[in-house]
Amino acid sequence: MKRQLRLDIVHRRDVLLGAAGAAAFISLLAMGGKASAQENVPTAADLLKSIHGDAKPTEARINVDLPEIAENGNTVPFGIVVESPMTGTDYVKAIHVVATGNPRPEVATFLLTPDSGKAAISSRMRLGKTQDIIVVAEMSDGKFYMGKRAVKVTIGGCGG
């Protein structure tokens, strides 16, 4: 009994049609995923509420270094310093950065310990438009401090 192997010739147009169909299917899936993902994005107010709950943050102890005008929202440098002794009993547990006008308001959360030595961070963020940047410092004793800066963006970085 002899087995016969048969290979069919695949034409280039068949491959291209299959690839186009697969791309269309993937884009349909992506659009559906994007719509449902956008529905689950919390607003800046919801995000802040999830950070500090019912506690009222005090506007003190935070120095937010941001440019007043960001010529390009794709990369906006920032620096944050929280006044704290950073001892075993009195230290900054977390620094939360929230951009009120971005499609996704949570920029970053930095976790600190007394071993950090100093409650100071710096980085870059993307900003889609002119907006307020709110910084919340979560302290080891359960208190919350807040700082706020307005940044005017001339060229949007995320969606603008």
Image: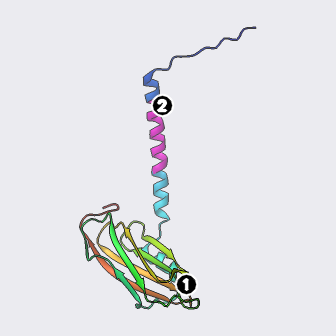
Q: Which residues are magenta?
A: 17-30
Q: Residue under circle 1?
A: 114
Q: At 48% across and 75% down in the image, what residue appears?
A: 47
Residue for point 42% across, 24% down: 13
Q: Quadrant of the C terminus?
A: bottom left
Residue 25: give x, y in percent of width and height: 48, 41
Q: Position of residue 125 (x, y in %)?
A: 37, 68
Please tell me whether mark 2 sits on a helix, a strand or a loop: helix
Residue 114 highlighted magenta (yes or no): no
Residue displayed at 46% across by 77% down: 96
Question: What residue type is disc 1 on?
Answer: Pro
Mark 1 Cα within 10 Å, few/some/many (few <14, many 20+)? some
In the figure, 118 relative to 152: above or below? below
Structure colour scheme? rainbow
Instruction: Locate residue 107: give its quadrant.
Output: bottom left
> Which one is in front, 9 or 92?
92
Residue denoted by label 2: 18
Nearer to us in this view, 94 or 85: 85
In the rendered structure, which disc, 1 or 2, sits on the residue that comes first in sequence? 2
The image shows a total of numbered marks equal to 2
> In the picture provided, is 72 more to the left or to the right than 40?
left
